[in-house]
Image (cartoon, grey):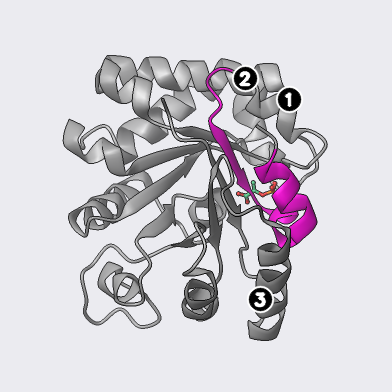
Amino acid sequence: MRDKIVAGNWKMNNDLAETEELLGKLKLQMVKEPEATVMVAPSFTNLYPTFQALKDTPVIVAAQNMHESESGAFTGEISAAMLKSIGVTTVILGHSERRAYFNETGEILAKKVKTAIENEMTVIFCFGEELEDRKNNRHFDLVEKQLKEGLFDLPQSSWKNIILAYEPVWAIGTGETASPEQAQEMHKHIRNLLNKNVGKEVADSTSILYGGSVKPNNAKEIFAKKDVDGGLIGGASLNAVDFVEIVNSF
Ligand code: PEP
């Protein structure tokens, strides 16, 4: 049985007061024991207050990024040890916005993943094609390349700490979602790649989330697909009612 997961990526939204307000609403809306594992990823400055506010709930708090080095002269960066020191043991890596705006290459991401695993953290690894890739029928190859660069050198034993998030860039924040069939087709491809490159056990047990304009009105259909194990949610995760509706969409 694979974990069903719904993770909210709050990106660079909400100051402390707004975060506290959202957390209050979330706690009101959320059932005590949701069927899915629920995660939220606030900005760095809001990580600790979020962790504190949610520590008596099953909700897991994740960081949106971290640096690949253990420590040192990297002004403005955050290390795995810093995250762990406030109780945060899950991190999103490889989000398309990090790849596109902050030049995070496959090589850098492989280092980040390695550091996270060495620190016994869980990684939500994001990847996905741009519209041009899909138009030119390169989306399957592109996804294979991103997985190969970031993850396929990991030993089998590390995969229990990996959650995959397929996020076609053309669907992120655009209101345009991949159809449930498109999502299933890619997730099946990803599982086949895991089978071929890492082994059947990992292919069968790794959760693969879909991300890209998931909303309360489309989550059920997408999550119903065989190889879709949940979602990474951007915009809709900033609204407690919408997010909880998505969490309850299995
Ligand atoms: C995301 O940024 O990971 C995302 C899926 O955003 P949205 O749901 O807003 O498309």
Whichever of labels 3 and 2 marks the residue nearer the N terminus, that label is: 3
* Residue drawn at point x = 69 percent, y = 38 percent: 170
Question: In the rendered image, which residue does mark 3 sit on?
Answer: 19
Give the secondary structure at mark 3: helix
* Residue drawn at point x = 39 percent, y = 29 percent: 145
* Residue drawn at point x = 21 percent, y = 80 percent: 72
Question: In the rendered image, which residue does mark 2 sit on?
Answer: 225
The segment highlighted magenta reads 226-248
Q: Nearer the viewer, residue 155 or 250?
A: 250
Cα separation between marks 2 and 1: 7 Å
Question: In the rendered image, which residue does mark 1 sit on?
Answer: 221
Whichever of labels 3 and 1 marks the residue nearer the N terminus, that label is: 3
Disc 3 under 8 Å from ligand 1? The reply is no
Image coordinates for residue 231, horizontal then vertical, percent:
60, 40
Give the secondary structure at mark 2: loop
Q: Is residue 1 left or right of residue 182?
A: left
Disc 2 to disc 1: CB gap under 8 Å: yes
Considering only vertical position in the picture, is 87 above or below 141? below
